Image: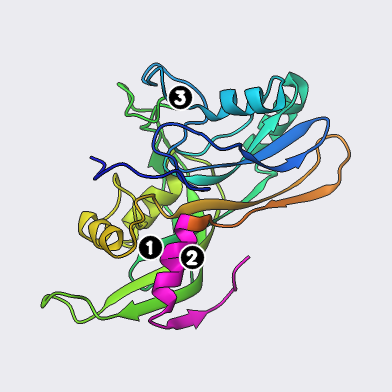
Amino acid sequence: MMPGRFLETDDYIEESLSNPLKILFQDEHLIAVFKPAGLLVHRSTSTLPHESILLQALRDQIGGFVFPVHRLDRPTAGIVLFGLNSFSAAKMVQMFTDRFVDKYYQALVCGFTPDRFVVDRPLEERFNFAADQASEVDNPTQDAKTEFSVIEQYEFPWETNEVSACQYSLLEIKPLTGRSHQIRRHLHHASCPIVGDHRHGNDEQNRWIFQKTGVYRMLLTAVRLDFRHPYTGELLTIATGRGSEFDRVVTYMRQFGSKKRKLGDR
């Protein structure tokens, strides 16, 4: 349950989107925007009438139809790409399916991780695509593989007698497959859950970060897409920052000193 009412930020909304969407790329075929955490990509049977929806908000903002080609979980912020017509969308859907699109994320997770590691663990597609909820019938297990690299790590005193220090890692993440909640579930399996993940995470750590920073959102952002344009063949890189709420937590962590720096901020 949400602990209170929150002001909208550039990377988090509670229910209603009041600010214009940030457009990261647009041409005659494609448009990419930054989706705040808390915003659904498209409507489902469980969506409440008053809730804001990314697809509809973007359609209203640009005054034209848009066609989704992929999605992000509701609590995940970052880049979402749309086609501006059904043909462009179909081409991009196929490119995602064929794994011709490289996706990069950043996440803040609990614990120190290896500098580089891979989780190769099959996952059941247990979650409904449209509603982001458990389906009545599980789908077959599918291969799932994710690469992780450390950007920075932080350690500072923990305010209980149970442990002597609290550790966190800021990661760059490249999913090599596209399963539901793949990054979140793989990090949970690796015993380093994402800060603010209220389904797969650590409730005690989530509460502590919220108390210290006031940040409630899950600290996972899709920060970069690399792919060749489906019509021109040009290599495109669409990139964005983590968002102000995510950055606020990173700033808080850095006051205690960074233990490592491997990749640097993008």
Location of the N terminus (image quadrant): top left
Is 72 placed left or right of 199 in the picture? right
x 53%, y 41%: residue:
178
- Disc 2 marks which amino acid? Leu
Residue 66 sits above or below residue 199 on the image: above
- Earlier-in-chain disc, 1 versus 3: 1
Location of the C terminus (image quadrant): bottom right
Is 196 placed left or right of 64 in the picture? left
The segment highlighted magenta reads 245-266
Q: Position of residue 101 (x, y in %)?
A: 68, 45
**Quadrant of residue 251 in the image?**
bottom left
Q: Name the residue under label 3.
A: 130
Report how far apart the C-alphas of labels 2 and 3 lie in the structure: 28 Å
Label disc, if present, on residue 171 of the rendered structure: 2
- Its colouring scheme is rainbow
Q: Name the residue under label 1.
A: 109
